[in-house]
Amino acid sequence: MKPIKSVVLFLFCFVVLGNVKSQNTTNEPVVFTINGKQKVYLGEFERQFLKNLNLNEKKVTSKDVDDYLKLYVKFKLKIQDASDAGKDTAAAYKQELAMYREQLSRNYLYDRAVTQGLIEEAYERMQSEIKVSHILIMCSRDASESDVAKATKRINEVYASLKRNPSADNFAEYAKTDSEDPGTKNSGGSLGYMTALQVVYEFENQAYKTPIGQISEPFRTDFGFHIVRVEEKRKNRGDIKVKHILIRVGTNAENTDEASKKKVEEIYAKLKSGEEKFDVMARAYSEDYSSKYNGGEMEYVNNTQYVGDIDRQNWIDKAYDLPNIGDMTAPFRSSFGWHILQKVGIKPIGSFDQMKNTLKNQVQQNQRSQISVDALVDKVKKEENYKLNKEAFDFLVKSLDTNFLNGNFKVEMLPAKYTKIKDPVAKKKETVSFDFPKMEMFNFAGESFTVEEFAMHLNGKKKINSSMSEAVESKLNSWVKDIAVNYQNNHLEEKSVEFRDIYQEYREGILMFNRMQEKVWDRANNDSVGLAQYFDQHKSEYTWGDRFNIEVYYSSSEKMAKQVMKEAKKGISADSMKKIHTKVKQLDFDYRIGKYQATDTYLFPQPDVLNKIFATPEYKTAKDKIFKLGQFQNDFVVVKVKEFLPAGPKLLEETRGPVASKYQEELEVQWLKELESKYNVSVNESVISTFKQKLGAQ
């Protein structure tokens, strides 16, 4: 079986390559060896050293090199240990490495020049945002000829009518009656604003080349046939950071629209009057749990990331419309509930240099990548002298019948012989016959691919809607493309030094991780006896400070605080108190319950509350007593001191995570000592000295 033809062998190559050690093909000097076998060459050491050192921050010193040499020796000792333990032959390791290689190789299976052009095109388009609507007539790529004809007829009829009247209102009416996109049909086909890299490439191209107020000609994507109308075009407004308060509607019986609206209006009144700060109110009341504990602050977002979701686009538009940083919206309703937004900042679109790496990744994952892959295939075909036997191709096309078009072709249907005139210009016409299935269809990389092999790719169960010649050519191109890409993939280590080096890092990184998992992390997690012994030896490092076990009640008035004191003395629960005191206003009452150290002030809306508790000596002798703490900003605070807990040692259960982390560090130190005694490391000091001189290290 020939290597570049076999899918099974191709996949196996991923695994085999995982066990190939980095080969030194030059006369590079050796930095160090382990047991006289594993060699680390200067090129590898220099590459890793420079990658892990920021040369812009400081001048390299001799100590920098020595310190990194020690670290790299330890790293290689772990790799050697993992290999000696057979971890590089484990099935799970091979499988994981194959997955990583497949992911990594995608970055090298494209034409870089073409990709650069696509990146630049995407960046140029991202300077603007386009508001678009569309009409879709669904039709998959593999639809029957009759279905394609029906869809084509329908989209052309709609286009002809819209061409006479391309107004927004008319387009919206046709979208509502004719479009088959369920997500936009009811909104008149509106997708809102979009920019580059957010929709399929064909759609993006039509959107950017269609003038404002005009419609595109019908075009096809994987979803079907579209007509696009461009409504508006504006400059990219950049990303916006906001603080968000959300009061949901319908999450429980109490969250009626009326109750939620009332609550958000109370919050807004306090914010507007300056009585409360936005982050305090967000932490206390917001039901957006992704931002609540960060004072309502969200990550940067932009309008176009919600393309197709008009509700969300309208939501973030409210913040963009605020004139100044720090301004707030009035409460407004969406399908999620009631919102208040505060504008925190605007981040303009980055420069090309800032964005090129991100854009590169997006382009490679986008439909555009096929353009770059096709360019790579053309390049590889040229490099490897691809030659099609046109004679065999033409005869194959002539020999096929309706069985092929109907998806019923079998290899056995190939003609056994191909006969032709030996010399067309000779007086005496002689014929010559060939075993047709064994004839060469094409030659690639010095390897012959036969008609019979290609015929295996002509089998199919679906009807073909194109002509015989087009269908055969399409299948041939698809097969050749796979062969060229697979060939390039199998030879990446030879063709790309960059790939080879990165792949070595992957290989060794996964290997070390798996060995660390076994020798350190799993032991720390599963060795309960060892963990307990370690904890006993280091108990003094894990202690609580002084703590109070308390319940803190916040009331909006002194009168309510007095009532709360009475209720607390009667043993009424905090939840019950909240139901009693928030019937009129949602914000009138709140509470905190738990065991707190003096450093836990960040858990309180007003940090001074906890500070006062710790500063009051009599509270330390109190047990299950109620105290009126006083007024803090707009709150009247009552505290129930359940008990004072003096500083003391923690139990293992109370600090298992930090203890396990330290135990892991100790296990790793012990493991490295074992490796240093087990393996002989020989460092070439002269090479290190020369390297230091090259860097100007002192």
Image (spheres, rainbow, N blue to C red):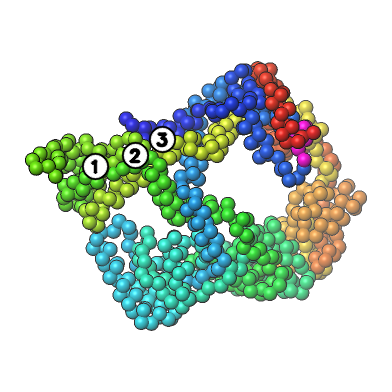
Characterize the local packing of mark 3: few (<14), some (14-19) or many (20 or more) Cα atoms within 10 angstroms.
some
| Magenta stretch contains residue 63 | yes
| Disc marking residue 455 | 1
Question: In which quadrant will I find the N terminus?
Answer: top left
Question: In which quadrant will I find the C terminus?
Answer: top right
Secondary element type, mark 3: helix
148 up-or-down from 83: above or below: below
| Disc marking residue 11 | 3
Along the horizontal axis of the image, is 113 left or right of 238? left
- The answer to which quarter of the image holds residue 508 is top right
Cβ–Cβ under 8 Å for marks 2 and 3: no
Percent of width and height locating residue 434: 16, 36
Along the horizontal axis of the image, is 13 left or right of 592? left
Q: Distance from label 2 to label 1 (Cα)?
A: 17 Å
Q: Amino acid at mark 1?
A: Ala
To which residue does mark 2 refer? 444
**Which residue is at a point 28% across and 63% down the rendered structure image?**
148
- The answer to which quarter of the image holds residue 632 is bottom right
Query: Can residue 133 be seen?
Result: no
Q: Sequence order check: which comes first, mark 1 or mark 3?
A: 3
Q: Distance from label 1 to label 3 (Cα)?
A: 23 Å
Q: Nearer the viewer, mark 2 or mark 1?
A: 2
Q: Which residues are magenta?
A: 59-64
Characterize the local packing of mark 1: few (<14), some (14-19) or many (20 or more) Cα atoms within 10 angstroms.
many
